Structure formats: structure tokens, C-alpha cells
Amino acid sequence: MINKQPANQSAAALVKTTIIIHLALTAGQILFAVVTFLIPKKPATGHSNDMLIFIVPTLAVSCFAAGHLLFKKLLSNINSQSPLKAKLISYQSATIIRLALLEGPSLFAIVSFLITGNMVFIGIAGLIILYFIYLRPTRQKIEDDLNLGYDEKAELN
């Protein structure tokens, strides 16, 4: 029998889970980029994939903006009177959405590099990965983003 009830996690466990999710998504992108970079490729010939040079940066910038705006909107929807666990679950959902919107263009850029051999694409993916690392959730960032009070900060630790 499959248990469909969510696990009753503590606030600290929810923070740790969010950090692990971020780490896994980051590691996946880095490993994919490294493996793709190590695969021997033919030098880029012709102009068969000219559209990718416009699509990849446009997708990266638009998903960056959409992710940032959606993250802020989801954070603003969190009720300040909610219990800490509810706030953390909402924060975790907002973070996952933001990271997914960044991971898509990164993986697309890596695949574009694999197809074309154009180093611009791996550079774009590298920039997205660096920003991804910058977004790493920490207790301090979570406290700041959620505007937690003293009691909630103590409960978080």
C-alpha cells in the first residue's frame, strides 16, 4: 500500500530539503555541461543553426525575468500570519519554480552547444549556472525573503 500522506517535516528539515533540491539541480546542470564539453564534436560548419544564436539568449533572459517576477509574486502571496511550516512550504514551491525556469534555458543552451559546437552556448549555460549557484538558499536568505520574526527564526534553528 502506498502512503500518500505528506511527511510531517520540521521547519529545519524543510530548509534542508530546499537546499538539497537546489544542490541536485545545480549538480545535474554542471555534470551535463561537463560531459557535453568532453564529447568530441565536429567544428561548427555552415549556418544550419543560425536561429539558435537568437533563441538561446532570448530564452535565457525571458526565463530569468519570468522566474524572478513569479518568485516575488509567490512570496508576496504568503500570508504573514501563517504558521512557519506553511510559509516554508510556499517558499520551497516558489524556489523550485524559479529554479526550474532557470534550468530549462541552461539545459537548452547545453544541448545547443552539443548540436552546434558553438562556445557561446556553453558560455550562456555557464552564466546561468553561476547565477543558479548565487541563488543557493541559505537560512539567512530564507529568513530575509520571508521576513521572519524573532520567534520564527528561533523555531527555524
Image (cartoon, grey):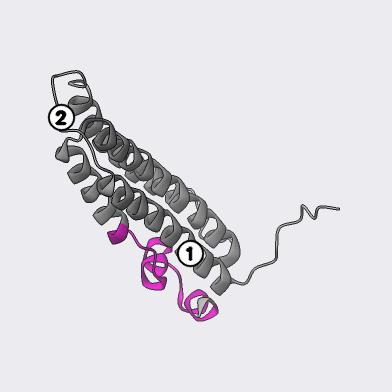
Is residue 22 one of those drawn in magenta?
no
Residue 75 drawn above or below residue 155: above
* Label 1 element class: helix
* Count of numbered labels shown in the rendering: 2
Cα–Cα span, label 2 and label 1: 37 Å
Whole-percent x, y for residue 63 in the image: 32, 37
Is residue 91 or residue 30 the one in the foreground?
Answer: 30
Callout 1, which amino acid? Ile
| Residue 83 seen in render | no
Callout 2, which amino acid? Ala
* Label 2 element class: loop
- Residues shaded magenta: 133-155
Is residue 92 or residue 30 the one in the foreground?
Answer: 30
Is residue 143 one of those drawn in magenta?
yes
| Residue 68 seen in render | yes
Residue 18 drawn above or below residue 32: below
Whole-percent x, y for residue 150 in the image: 46, 78
Please tell me which residue is depicted at 19% across the width and 26% down the height of the picture: 54
Residue 97 drawn above or below residue 82: above
In terms of image quadrants, where is residue 147? bottom left
Residue 92 drawn above or below residue 69: below
- Asked if residue 39 lies left or right of residue 19, the reply is left
Please tell me which residue is depicted at 37% across the width and 48% down the height of the picture: 72
- Asked if residue 58 lies left or right of residue 9, the reply is left
Please tell me which residue is depicted at 76% across the width and 56% down the height of the picture: 5
- Asked if residue 51 lies left or right of residue 1, the reply is left
Q: Which residue is mark 2?
A: 44
Q: Of all residues shown, which one is farthest toward the right? A: 1
Q: Which residue is mark 1?
A: 20
Is residue 36 or residue 2 the one in the foreground?
Answer: 36
Determine crowd level at label 2: few under 14, some 14-19, many 20+ residues with C-alpha closer than 10 A.
some
Whole-percent x, y for residue 45 in the image: 14, 24
